[in-house]
Amino acid sequence: MCNIKYDYSKLLGRMKEKGITQANLASYIGVSETTVNLSLGNKRAFKQDEIRNLCKVLDIPISELDIYFFSYQTLEN
């Protein structure tokens, strides 16, 4: 696995906007809270079906997928 680090700040912001915790999100997409935590912490990659389900739960349009899931971390992040 690559050591690419993604910036999930937009995703976390969307969760906050919607009032959804990591525990809620885990339940909605059918994974454990630990799985969500590891993924958001760049310790584990999100799977395609998880991304699809996250988009549904958080109302993220497909056209904005890259902004929420594939923005790289920079030194400033």
Image (spheres, helix red, strand yellow):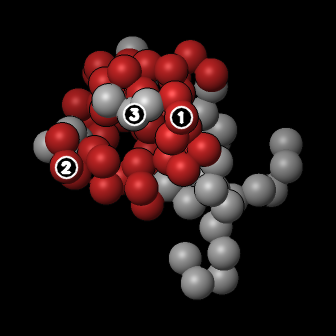
Labels 2 and 3: the sequence-earlier one:
2
- Seen at 36% across and 53% down, the residue is 12
**Residue beneath label 1, please?**
63
Label 3, secondary structure: give it: loop
Q: CA distance from mark 2 to mark 3?
A: 12 Å
Query: Residue flagged by tag 2: what amino acid is it?
Result: Glu
- 66 over 49 or under it: above or below: below
Q: CA distance from mark 1 to mark 2?
A: 19 Å
Write down the quadrant of residue 55 in the picture: top left
Label 1, secondary structure: give it: helix
Q: Nearer the viewer, mark 1 or mark 3?
A: 1
**Does the image show residue 39?**
no
Quadrant containing the C terminus in the rendered view: bottom right
Neighbours of disc 1 within 10 Å: few (<14), some (14-19), many (20+) = few
**Does the image show residue 7?**
yes
Give the numbered dot on residue 60: 3
Query: Residue flagged by tag 1: what amino acid is it?
Result: Ser
Neighbours of disc 2 within 10 Å: few (<14), some (14-19), many (20+) = few
